[in-house]
Amino acid sequence: MRQLILLLTLALFSGPLLAANPACEKMAAEKKLAGAAKNSFMKKCEREQPGNAQAMCDGKAAEKNWPAPPRTAS
């Protein structure tokens, strides 16, 4: 039972660490960002990654209060 609780706790807290982009983390460290500035920078950096075109498009639309384009089944 203890092992199960430990495993679930580790899984819960390791998710955000694994989701972070190492390139964005490195740039934030170089700029010596902390707190809210780092959070804002990380969100923008991850949104603007070249391999994430759909998220980048959705992010820009959200910034301009445009509705997201309808999803197609293609």
Image (cartoon, rainbow, N blue to C red):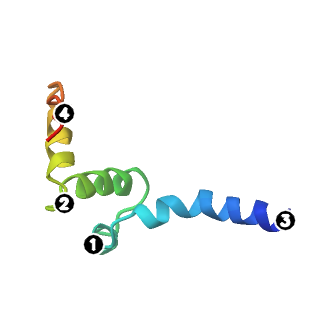
Q: Is residue 66 above or below residue 35?
A: above
At x 20% / y 41%, what residue is drawn?
59
Question: As shown in the figure, which amino acid type bears the numbered disc 2?
Answer: Gln
Question: As shown in the figure, which amino acid type bears the numbered disc 1?
Answer: Ala
Question: As shown in the figure, which amino acid type bears the numbered disc 4?
Answer: Arg
Q: CA distance from mark 1 to mark 2?
A: 10 Å
Select label 3 or label 4 by which is in front: 4
At x 16% / y 28%, what residue is drawn?
70
Return the residue at label 4: 71
Crowdedness near tag 1: few (<14), some (14–19) or many (≥20) residues, C-alpha within 10 Å: few
Q: CA distance from mark 1 to mark 3?
A: 36 Å
* Quarter containing the N terminus: bottom right
Return the residue at label 3: 2
Secondary structure beneath label 3:
helix
Secondary structure beneath label 1:
helix
What's the mark number on residue 49? 2
Secondary structure beneath label 2:
loop
> If you read the primary sequence from the N terminus, does the residue marked by circle 1 or circle 2 appear first?
1
* Quarter containing the C terminus: top left
> If you read the primary sequence from the N terminus, does the residue marked by circle 3 or circle 2 appear first?
3
Return the residue at label 1: 23
Q: Is residue 64 above or below residue 40?
A: above
| Labelled pair 1, 2 in contact (Cβ < 8 Å) | yes
